[in-house]
Amino acid sequence: MAFWEKFKSKKGDRTGGLKSDRKIDAGVKALDETTREKMNQKKGQKSPMDGSGEVPKDTSLSEKQLKMDTGYAYRVLLKPMISEKSSSLLVHNQYVFVVDDRANKIEVKKAVQKVYDVKVVGVNIVRMRGKVVRFGRTNGKRSIWKKAIVTIQSGQKIELYEGV
């Protein structure tokens, strides 16, 4: 009898292989269930296998909720830009901010609305190139940055700019 003939299925056997395959599969399923229960107990959640039939809901924040958090808004808005030109734009209800260089108009609008609680009508973004500077005989270049000119609804104000 050859070695491979041990693994051939017999006429009455429907498994198609070793009979011990069923035992191995059952052991893996049992192992999976016990490890799931242990992991859920560590997290302080009820196990879905405890007989209640309810699967615990995930309590973590979704990506959209995380982006709407005020901490994210402060990562988008780096600082308000106070200059002669930005002061002259206050007449037109426009405020100027230095923003993260990866931010877009939608993120800037949501951030200003979240932080300052005003209605934003429009956002214009300008990408400022870094100037070439010299330190003695060494040449260098300043960083690239973005500034956002935010137009808010007439009649509303951002208190930060008052008295400038």
Image (cartoon, rainbow, N blue to C red):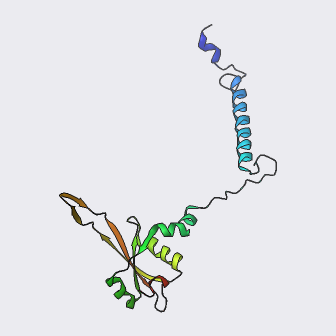
In the rendered view of the protein, which quadrant contains the N terminus? top right
Residue projecting furthest to the front: 136
Residue at 73%, 40% (x, y): give it: 33
Residue projecting furthest to the right: 51
In the rendered view of the protein, which quadrant contains the C terminus? bottom left
Residue projecting furthest to the top: 1
Position in image of residue 131 (x %, y %): 24, 67
Position in image of residue 82 (x %, y %): 37, 80
Locate residue 78: give its quadrant. Answer: bottom left
* 67 left or right, relative to 131: right
Residue at 55%, 65% (x, y): give it: 64
- Relative height, residue 118 to residue 18 (above, below): below
Q: Front-most of 61 and 139?
A: 139
Q: Front-most of 130 and 62?
A: 130
Residue at 73%, 27% (x, y): give it: 23
- Relative height, residue 37 to residue 91 (above, below): above
Q: Front-most of 153 and 53?
A: 153
Position in image of residue 133 (x %, y %): 22, 64
* 18 left or right, relative to 130: right
Instruction: Tally the numbered discs.
Output: 0
Locate residue 152: give its quadrant. Answer: bottom left
- Relative height, residue 7 to residue 138 (above, below): above
Residue at 55%, 61% (x, y): give it: 63
